[in-house]
Amino acid sequence: MYIRIGNKIKRARIDRGFSQHELGAALGLTATAINYYEKGKRKISIEDIYRLATTLKKPLAYFLSDSDHLISKKTAGKIKPENCIASLVKIPVLGVIHAGESLCSEQNLLGYLPVPGEKAAKGLFALKVKGNSMDGKGICDGDLVLLRRQDHVDFIGQVVCALINEIENSLKIYLEEEDRTILRSANPSYPDIIFENDGSVVIQGVYAGVFKFP
């Protein structure tokens, strides 16, 4: 993955006519750091990808997409950096949600995640996943899970952020059975968490997507 992103950085840099030294200077990095990025030898943060998109006049999706489609030099020259990222909206990353045993949440603001489209981002927030109980749904340790604020499920079996006993939260599959609420992991090694319908479980948000860092 890092090699793929590095190849795109190199091609975008060449399209703009920058040397590694010039690109590094624009980003406050060394030429060596740019060289490591391009060779896939160094992890790159979403913040640096965001800055590269601005400097190299490429859409953010250019670097994050699995597609190898490249914008031509002729087209790239007409793209204004503000048009590449103007539609991005920053949604809050509020803290850590445990996809495993239910543990106390760290309800602090960790930062912001840029996502495209104000309409699509409305009501969204993100939580950093800790644990592996939702691996079966493709939600893994270290991911940022996107959640839409609402206090109800749209359907039984939906993935939710559930507040338990007013002090704990967990990312689980929401199920109902007679007069009980069941919170189920997507990893069969974890047992179901079962509650009576007495208000012990409050839905804070429903699954809207997942962001995986390169």
Image (spheres, rainbow, N blue to C red):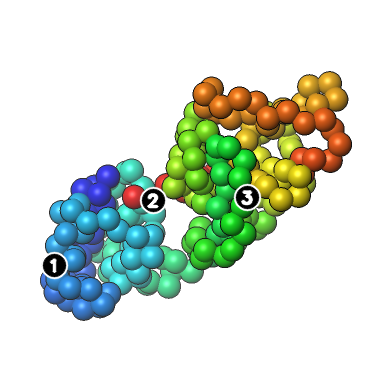
The image shows residue 78, relative to residue 196, as above or below, that is below
Q: CA distance from mark 3 to mark 1?
A: 42 Å
Please give the residue where the numbered disc 2 appears in the rendered image.
Answer: 213
Label 1 neighbour load within 10 Å: few <14, some 14-19, many 20+:
few
Placement of the N terminus among the 4 image quadrants: top left
Using residue 69 as the reference point, say whether residue 120 is left or right of it.
right
Amino acid bearing label 3: Cys
Residue 108 position by quadrant: bottom right
- Quick one: SS at disc 1? helix
Report the residue at 68% width, 30% height from top. 193
Q: Position of residue 60 (x, y in %)?
A: 39, 59
Report the residue at 65% width, 58% height from top. 122
Q: CA distance from mark 2 to mark 1?
A: 22 Å
Amino acid bearing label 1: Thr
Please give the residue where the numbered disc 1 appears in the rendered image.
Answer: 32
- Quick one: SS at disc 3? strand
Which label number is shown at residue 104? 3
Amino acid bearing label 2: Phe
Using residue 63 as the reference point, say whether residue 201 is left or right of it.
right
The image shows residue 186, relative to residue 125, as above or below, that is above
Q: Nearer the viewer, residue 117 or 158?
A: 158
- Circle nearer the N terminus (3, 2): 3
Label 2 neighbour load within 10 Å: few <14, some 14-19, many 20+:
few
Q: Position of residue 190 (x, y in %)?
A: 56, 27
Label 3 neighbour load within 10 Å: few <14, some 14-19, many 20+:
some
Q: Position of residue 9 (x, y in %)?
A: 23, 59
Residue 106 position by quadrant: bottom right
Report the residue at 25% width, 49% height from top. 2
